[in-house]
Image (tube, grey):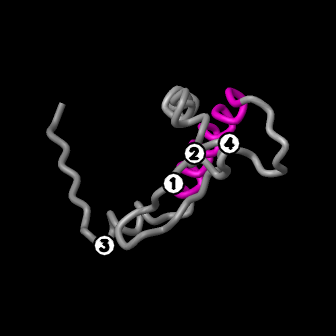
Amino acid sequence: MGKVEVKMSSSGCKSVLKSGGVKADLLSRAQAIAASACAKTSPDTMSLDPFMARAHTGHVSVKARAFAATPHGKAASNKNAVLLKSLDAGR
């Protein structure tokens, strides 16, 4: 079989990394992690979920994160490492 060589321009790479498809995929993974962390956290009287997910388009690429949105979520994450234990949900 012959050797295949692919070259991408810098602007092409940036446009792929900033595309809507990449943003949607990363956000869905972050939301799955946040949902898994919420399921592992005890019920709370607050109306917000203890963990949330957001995506942001930066200068070079899209970034997504799952984070503790309430004090209850922060306490659960600090005490029981709930976010860390939920990372497999994003695969």
Instruction: Report the side of 20 relative to 43 (left or right).
Output: left
Nearer to me, 21 or 59: 59
Task: Confirm or deny contact between disc 2 and disc 3 (CB under 8 A).
Answer: no
Circles 1 and 2: CB atoms closer than 8 Å: yes
Sort mark 4 into few (<14), some (14-19) or many (20+) by Cα contacts within 10 Å: some
Identify the image quadrant of the N terminus. Answer: top left
State how far apart marks 2 and 3 are (Cα): 26 Å
Mark 2 lies on residue: 30
Q: CA distance from mark 3 to mark 4?
A: 43 Å
The residue that disc 4 covers is 72
Q: Amino acid at mark 3?
A: Ser
Find disc 1 in the rendering and name its residue: 64
Q: Are circles 1 and 3 on residues that touch, CB within 8 Å? A: no
Dot placed on the residue nearer the N-terminal end, 2 or 3: 3
Tag 4: residue type?
His
- Give how far apart the Cα atoms at labels 2 and 4 are: 19 Å
User: Was residue 85 drawn as part of the magenta stretch in this picture?
Assistant: no
Q: Reply above or below: 14 against 29.
A: below
Distance of mark 1 from mark 3, alpha carbons? 21 Å
